[in-house]
Amino acid sequence: MRPSLDKTILFIAASLPALALLWLLPTGGLGVNPIREGMHYTGDWAIRLLILALAITPAAKVSGAKKLFRYRRMIGLFAFFYGLLHVFTYVVLDHFFDAETIIKDIAKRPFITIGMGVFLILLALAVTSTNKMVRRLGARRWQALHRLVYAAGIGTAVHFTLSVKKDITEPLIYSAIIATLLLARLLLRYELLPRLSLRSS
């Protein structure tokens, strides 16, 4: 089946930050410390796309635009992709596969411990995102597993906040957005949010 035009546009849009990174690296656009800036850049896009993925369910349910659910998987996979680039930068470029240093880092620095935990959750969600895995796990177990995206959202917010040493304005903004989305999901579960009756196309 050929991908629809809207999904193609979404794929291109979500790929643009990675393409921009390929341009920034050789042109010096990442400044005097490209590894650190690259880590921040990929981490920023991972959390932005994770927030967008978390927003799909409340937006679709409140608006009645069920078509939005079609984009949730792709957005979630792109969030994992940028998270993978984030971890790759840390493990390969920053520490050159130095397992001993990485393990000590994970054990001693809480924000790295939490970040690795979030990455493992996103990895599990990405691996089980296919229709084949839904059938293999069964709908109930698959749904239970994918509810871990809430933990990933909270963990990402904590990871980002703890990693910033000075101005925490940006991580606090992201944290507030994630908290709002999780609250919206909770209110929707107990039918405490009004829903519109838009017809999905």
Image (tube, rainbow, N blue to C red):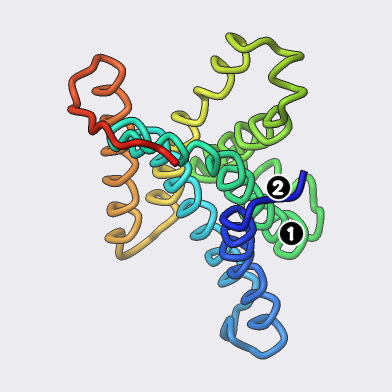
Snapshot quadrant of residue 123: top right
Compared with 33, 179 (above or below) is above
Q: Residue at x 40, y 49 (%)?
A: 162
For this rendering, which residue is in front, 184 or 4? 4
| Closer to us: 94 or 85 | 85
Residue with the mark numbered 2: 102
In the image, taking residue 70 as reference, residue 181 lies left or right, namely left
Q: Amino acid at mark 2?
A: Ile
Q: Tag 1 or tag 2, which sits nearer the N-term?
A: 1
Density class for disc 2 (Cα within 10 Å; few <14, some 14-19, many ≥20) is some
Q: Position of residue 131 (x, y in %)?
A: 71, 26
Residue 157 image point, x, y percent: 40, 44
Q: Residue at x 63, y 46 (%)?
A: 80
Residue drawn at 34 percent across, 51 percent down: 174
For marks 2 and 1, give the CA distance.
7 Å
Query: Which residue is depicted at the point 26% across and 30% down?
Result: 183
Picture coordinates of residue 25 (x, y %)? 68, 81
Q: Which residue is mark 1?
A: 95
Q: Are marks 2 and 1 in contact (CB under 8 Å)?
A: yes
Residue 136: give x, y in percent of width and height: 76, 14
